[in-house]
Amino acid sequence: MKDLIDKLHEFAKQDFPVADVTAYLEAYEFKMDDREKYCFFENKFYTRNLVFRDELFEILVICWGPGQVAPVHGHEGEKCWARVEKGKLQFCDYSILSETPIELKMNNLVTGDKGFLDGPAEIHSVENIFNEPAVSLHIYAKPFDACDIYDLENKTVERVTLKCYSQYGELC
């Protein structure tokens, strides 16, 4: 994990160059022993498990039970990458067509298994549509504590405070 954190600090000095960060994350091996201490599952919702955070970036391990979904949400204009570490996830990327009322266009719908890298995505949803648990590694350039959730049916946006299920390997 230290090698990932050190490399992300190098990338932060260059404002996280997308091609370089993407290439690094595609090749990065997140060892199961390193990952397991951050893997906490909950039956009712996916869990956000904080691995590292400073003023430049944060690293999360997100654990998904079957059928769990992160609704359509934004990333505060910051760069974000998500890589599947275990299982499979469905990613759906969107762009804004109109802000009043809110209207989004689906740009891309993909299913990724172990090693698949999504990002950087500005607005997307993530879902475990499969019958097995999944784990994903998330890198957020410039951490944020709240984000917009888009309700496509009602054409509304809700500001939501983000919470972690665990921090640094300990339940909150």
Image (spheres, helix red, strand yellow):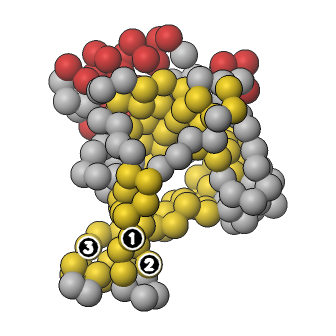
The kind of residue tagged 3 is Ile
Residue labelled with disc 2: 151
Q: Residues within 10 Å of mark 1 (few under 14, many from 20)?
A: few
Label pair 3/1, CB-CB below 8 angstroms: no
Q: Quadrant of the N terminus?
A: top right
The circle on residue 96 is 3
Element marked by disc 1:
strand
Instruction: Give the residue at x 35% y 37%.
Output: 143
Inter-mark Cα distance, 1 to 2: 8 Å
Instruction: Give the residue at x 52% y 67%.
Output: 71
Element marked by disc 3:
strand
Residue 44 is drawn in which quadrant? bottom right
Looking at the image, the residue that sits furthest to the left is 14
Residue labelled with disc 1: 158
Label pair 1/2, CB-CB below 8 angstroms: yes
Task: Tell me which numbered mark, 1 or 2, is placed earlier along the sequence.
Answer: 2
The kind of residue tagged 2 is Asp
Position above or below: 81 against 100: above
- For residue 50, side relative to residue 47 (left or right): left
Inter-mark Cα distance, 2 to 3: 13 Å
Residue 172 percent across, percent down from the top left? 64, 35
Inter-mark Cα distance, 3 to 1: 15 Å
Is residue 23 in view from this perspective?
A: no
Element marked by disc 2:
strand
Is residue 67 in view from this perspective?
A: yes
